Amino acid sequence: MKKIKKILIANRGEIAVRIIRAIREMNLSPVVVYSDADKLSLHVRLADEAYYIGESPSTLSYLKVDKIIETAKISGADAIHPGYGFLAENADFAQEIEKAGITFIGPEPDAIIKMGSKTRSREIMSAAGVPVVPGTIEPIKDTNELKDIAEKMGFPLLLKASAGGGGKGMRKVEKIEELEKAYERAKSEAASSFGDPDVYIEKYIEEPHHVEIQILADNYGNTIYLGERECSVQRRYQKIIEETPSPFITDEVRKEMGDIAVRAAKAVNYRNAGTVEFIVDKDQNFYFLEMNTRLQVEHPITEMVTGIDLVKEQIRIASGEKLGYAQEDIVPRGSSIECRIYAEDPFNDFSPSPGKIIEYVSPAGGIGVRDDSGVYEGFEVPIFYDPLISKLVTWGRDREEAINRMKRALFEYRIAGIKTSIPYFLQILENEEFLSGNYTTNLIERIESVKKEDPEDYEFVALFATGLRNLEMNTTSSQNDVSPDCSASNWKKYGQMKSLRRF
């Protein structure tokens, strides 16, 4: 069994803070790295040791494999946790860590390689009897092959980057006239985002749901699943709200998907935490999409319903311990939902909103509210990284309670100095289709933009919910200039707003 005492976190922001907390609770020592932009960040403040690794752009800091490993050696770290993003699914990084005699808290490099290529993983899954979306196994060679396959498959279809993720290098194509231009754009984006221009074709599933299964696997052949997460609330192919359990699938399908996810993991001799993602059609037929060989952004909702700390489990598995749970021990309770709080302006096409946070009051408190945040009052949100600043998570005895608790928490969340996506979430949580539980990945396309539907009401919500200073109801002040008047009349106005009538 490997002795781990000190762990270097090769990441930043809210996920670095979340990992620090798990490490401390295990009586281990957290070490972090930081760039110029993050020298005053929360993860630097909370760690036992912090080491400067480069300039603000991630290519000069958080993506520098040699610098991170060198820092781990200097600090005396026994292990490295990659978090998610940056180098989390970089097989070369995992291999270099192993060569340095340091423990990588994640899967074997071979599993990362096999599941890192969507075309290769589709081939492996097909051989293992895992259902995959109809499409090509190999990348498209040229436009002639592209047109031939597309005409045989029919429209609509998806062009997807072989090495991709997060919607990058992905294009939906409705008709043959759009095909070649979409192909060139997908290739170009795939090359710039992942260094790999390969693109393949996948049949577009009508009325799709995005459902994923969380798995844990140790080094002794034990693999379990911890339930599913419904991830169909997406904007530009990026998840923004997740919940568990899925309100769409049945218990029978839930178990079948879990068993298939375990089969998928075993097909690549997977270890540690991972997520098998599926696309589910309107009849609850499901197909393998990909496997994320790392911790997911939305992992807290699984923790809320199972009571299992996934980061601690990752560390235990990497230390050589056996899983402490059998499949029959996993009995999720209640319902949980997560909203990803972004430093974005929902009134301006969700453009990034970096800047100094002049007021910050977290809504975490009371039963079932968790705020995984990487910021604080006075912190300068940098422009160099993903705009995710916090993950707000609620739990309830049932879905209705979890949603109502989330609305209450969003209403209490006070962030001033920057704009955030909070008003947008309040809109989604009032949408009838979302509340029905039978929503698809097309939900956001069917919800009008915040700035187009009752803009004055949403401006008021932004003012009221973020808690800024000196609100005067007859002014045109922006979201970040003022503070709510919490008088009875304004509470009444809030309750009467058409788009938020169910709050």
Image: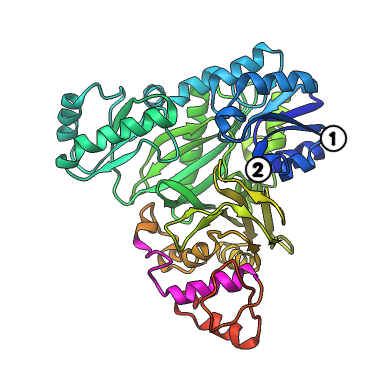
**Which one is in front, 471 or 123?**
471
Q: How is the image coloured?
A: rainbow
The CA span between labels 1 and 2 is 22 Å
Task: Please tell me which of labels 1 and 2 falls first in the chain.
Answer: 2
Residue at screen point 62% across, 61% down: 417
Depth-wise, is mark 1 or mark 2 nearer the camera? 2
- Asked if residue 131 shows in the view, the reply is no
Q: Is residue 207 above or below residue 326?
A: below
Callout 1 secondary element: loop
Crowd tier of the residue under label 2, counting other residues whose Cα lies within 10 Å: few below 14, some 14–19, many 20 or above: many
**Which one is in front, 410 or 326?**
410
Q: Position of residue 292 (x, y in %)?
A: 51, 33
Q: Describe residue 477's horizontal placement relative to residue 173 as left or right.
A: right
Instruction: Find residue 216 and report its image quarter.
Output: top right
- Three-letter amino acid code at disc 2? Gly
Residue at screen point 65% across, 85% down: 487
Which residue is identified by label 1? 27
Which residue is identified by label 2? 13
**Which one is in front, 256 or 83?**
83
Cβ–Cβ under 8 Å for marks 1 and 2: no
Q: Residue furthest bottom?
A: 489
Q: Which residues are magenta?
A: 446-468
Callout 2 secondary element: helix
Q: Position of residue 386 (x, y in %)?
A: 54, 43
Residue at screen point 73% across, 25% down: 321
Q: Position of residue 104 (x, y in %)?
A: 66, 22
Dividing the image into 4 quarters, which one contains the C terminus? bottom right
